[in-house]
Amino acid sequence: MAGSGNAHLRQAAELLKIQNLKVEFATPKGKTEIISDFSIDVGDSEVLGVVGESGCGKSTLAKTIVQINKAKSGSILFEGNDIVALSKTQAKLISKEIQMIFQDPISSLNPAKKIRNIISEPLKIHKVAFDERSINETLSKVGLDANIVLDRKPRQFSGGQCQRISIARALGLSPKLLICDEPVSALDVSIQAQILNLLIDIKDEFKMSMLFISHDLSVIKYIADRIAVMYLGKLCEVGSTDQVILKSSHPYTQALVDSVLDVNSGSSIKTRHKIELKGEIPSFTKPPSGCRFRLRCPFAQPICEQDEPQIRKVGEDHFVACHFPIMQNG
Amino acid sequence: MTLTVTEKPNATPVAKRSSSKGLGWFFWACTFWVLAVIILAIIAPLLPIDNPNKTFVCQPFSGPSGSHLLGCDDLGRDILSRIIFGSRVSMFVGIVSIGIGLIIGGFLGLISGYNNKKLDTVMNTIANIIISFPTLILLLAIVAVFNHSLIVITLSISFISIPLLFRVIRSATISVANKEFVQAARTMGSSRIRIVFVEILPNITPIIVVYGCLGIGSAIIAEGTLAFLGLSVSLPTPSWGNMIAEGAQSFLRRDFLLTLWPSIMIIMTVVCFNFISQRLEGKFNSGDGAI
Amino acid sequence: MEPTTDSISVENLSVSFKTDRGLLKAVDSVSFSLRKGSILGIVGESGSGKTVLSRTLIRLLPETNLKIEGSIDLFGIKVTSLKQRQLRHLYGSLASIIFQDPLTALNPVMKIKKQIAETLKVASNHNGSNIKKSVIDLLDRVGIPDPKSKSESYPHQLSGGQRQRVMIASAIANSPKLLIADEPTTALDVTIQLQILKLLKELQKQNDMTLIMVTHDLGVVEYICDYVAVMYAGKIVEFGRTEDILSRPLMPYTRALIDSTPSIHRDKSEKLMPIESMIPDPFNLPKGCRFAPRCRHSQTRCLIESPRPTQDAINTSHSYSCFYPLKNEWAVSKANETIATSDE
């Protein structure tokens, strides 16, 4: 895996097209590449799920798209404009179209501000006219009662409620792309389902696209149309949700699918595990040569050490970066 | 779906100390004292008390009496009046110097703490250099080079407070700047200045208040020290520090009360400021958040 | 089950915190018993009291503002009647605990070998060279590669999974009869989670240890636990064998929890059924059944009267606190249908 190439990018005009993105962080030991040669695209009204373990670069990807992190090279085309190369004022215009929801619902709201000010802040920044009524409307869309909510501060709300407030804040500008960085992983299961359903409803209503980042394949499966699997800053596999989960082609994807502990699967799960990974994710500072997954891969061969696999097509809307992809029947 | 607001159900059940019990009577007593001193200092000329510099309004060294509540000093001046007029110096120096310190040090701390690496390095180095001088010697040096007028004393104390307040506010800014809501503001296209003043500043206001109160206490002591050494406002203008000095000279002769009254004033006022600061800090830390 | 020397039995246990807002009952009249060598999962959402319950079992909570009522019997030892200074003897060989975040639970300035040696020294039958060997043995048993050189490292030099292994090593160092694992895999990646759960299961079997897993994740329960206690707002609302609870839950809360969990085996068109609203304010609990205000099946009685734990007539290992338990799969799907239609 650890694939390069752009074979999986679709030709039609896409909302977001990331090409050969590279992101580096300076560490005391020198520069570390967090995302290397990464390409992906997101279509209109499409939910792209990005899945991977901690340190695979998925959060960095999100933060690079919303311009918190700087890209070293490559391009991020949003409706044809390259975010990486934009000037400050142009970038501000685009930031209106791309909103983000964070993992920790409580710390992503300013504790010193009232909900009223939190929700109207993006409107003030972008000088969008608003009144009490439009704010109330947005709040009711996320299932909150404006009368109760507006004059309180974030600490008076539970995690689920704070996440609703975050969503309301993002919706105020009617963005075209909503980036969700593990939006439900800090929430209890019952609340998690509320928020997931809310996100799905909102996506349909606002005709938004979504880049949904999670470590949890079950959540991704529920919400995403397409899935991209990342490992150590590289793309392993991308394709439609069913293709990636049911016909996983990359050994890493298969391992992820196999490690999901799932209550609805019946008792067969205890015997089902096929691929089990040894060891842990290697460090970014010295990634393995060739395929970055090879050290943990049960199928690794000498070629995996020498050559980095290129992304290639294995099915209809299904691409993988592996020298020895798993061929699943059916 | 509607929402009922309850206290966060998953808030830790461990007993929160003091937060909902309020600040306690002692806090309010301290606040009362501080406010009383400030108000008396402001309206001192309007009070029905003798001119503090007028000599022989009463018998020198006469003890407390009905017409002179705290008695008289060696030159027959009314001690109460001198204390009240003396508080004008102490409070002016305390509040104004720390006010200046907070405005300059706070502003620098905010901008250097939020994402400005080069500036931060430079500012931090300068602050460290200033802090490395012994405070009192630095004060003496400044006063010696210029003069010991009220303005010079105030400015020199604020000069010393700037790097200290800078450091406190800078580190508070850094810790707030790493929170997700600051990132959220960035993704919304908020400008740097807007983030500093709209997102970060309200969160460090509690720290500004806490360290402001603490700083005022220290500034009062610093002024008192200079005055005791005869390096504050020139006599006969009273200040608590020079009253102690005067009393100390006459102490051997007669009356310890001359030293006692201004000392009590300094101690009470400084203790009150420190206590207010400490209680507020506890209150803010207990999660009752920003004001 | 009568308290015997080879079981854990908890009776009428209540744990309250004294707070400024009044007494907070985090655990309310909880009873259960567990045979030695089995794995119990305590599941619940945040605020359900699962962590307080598990820590009270070994009296780990600071007891200055705490009130414990009822009795806890760990293998014949009455934990509730122990004096503070006797508690020390409880830890190590009788019971120990591992936490969610191994980085904060390990001392950052102490080498791994020293931390484990410290636990070993509590049990007296170890001398110097003996301890060194035992430490390396332990690290080897918990699957740390190259235990000899790893024992020389500090916690921050290890990865999350390895740190959790070290925590486990020091927890099992004195072969405790009871190991409490408080969300041991929540902070870990899925592939690592599986490794750690396997390890726990293996160690449990080898040592015939009783394991209590505190978790919010039904998948973890299904994977590792023999028994499950489902907690809601301080009460155990359902208790039984894992397969009974997960495939034939009687309490609507358990059913709702399962239905709101996303699954990769679920069809995409199948919508998740969230539990509406949120858990009650612990200072202002509903009068009757605590789940009633959120329950799809609640009736008037549920809002007035509090249900007591009831044993299932056929399957006596299964108990629940509900006036209108879900009868069987058929009843469940029927009930869901009516809800679906009434929603539209």
Image: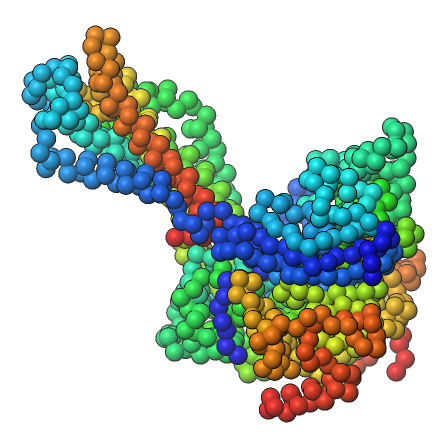
In the shown orientation, is residue B146 left or right of residue C111? left
In percent of the image, x 90 and y 50: which residue is there?
A: C207
In percent of the image, x 65 and y 47: which residue is there?
A: C61
Using the image, determine if residue A278 lies above or below residue A51: above
In percent of the image, x 56 and y 62: which residue is there?
A: C282
**x%, y% of residue C88?**
74, 39
How is the rendered protein coloured? rainbow
**x%, y% of residue C185?**
75, 57
> A220 or C311: which is nearer to us?
C311
> C187 or C72: which is nearer to us?
C72
Q: Indicate the quadrant where residue A3 lies.
A: bottom right
**x%, y% of residue A93?**
47, 69
Using the image, determine if residue A311 lies above or below residue C267: above
Q: Indicate the quadrant where residue C342 lies.
A: bottom right
Q: In this orientation, does residue B47 appear?
A: yes
Residue farthest front in this picture: C2
Q: How many numbered marks appear?
A: 0
In percent of the image, x 72 and y 64: which residue is there?
A: C43
**x%, y% of residue B76?**
11, 17
In the shown orientation, is residue C88 left or right of residue B180? right
In the shown orientation, is residue A314 left or right of residue B33? right
Q: In this orientation, does residue C188 appear?
A: no
In the shown orientation, is residue C340 left or right of residue B249? right
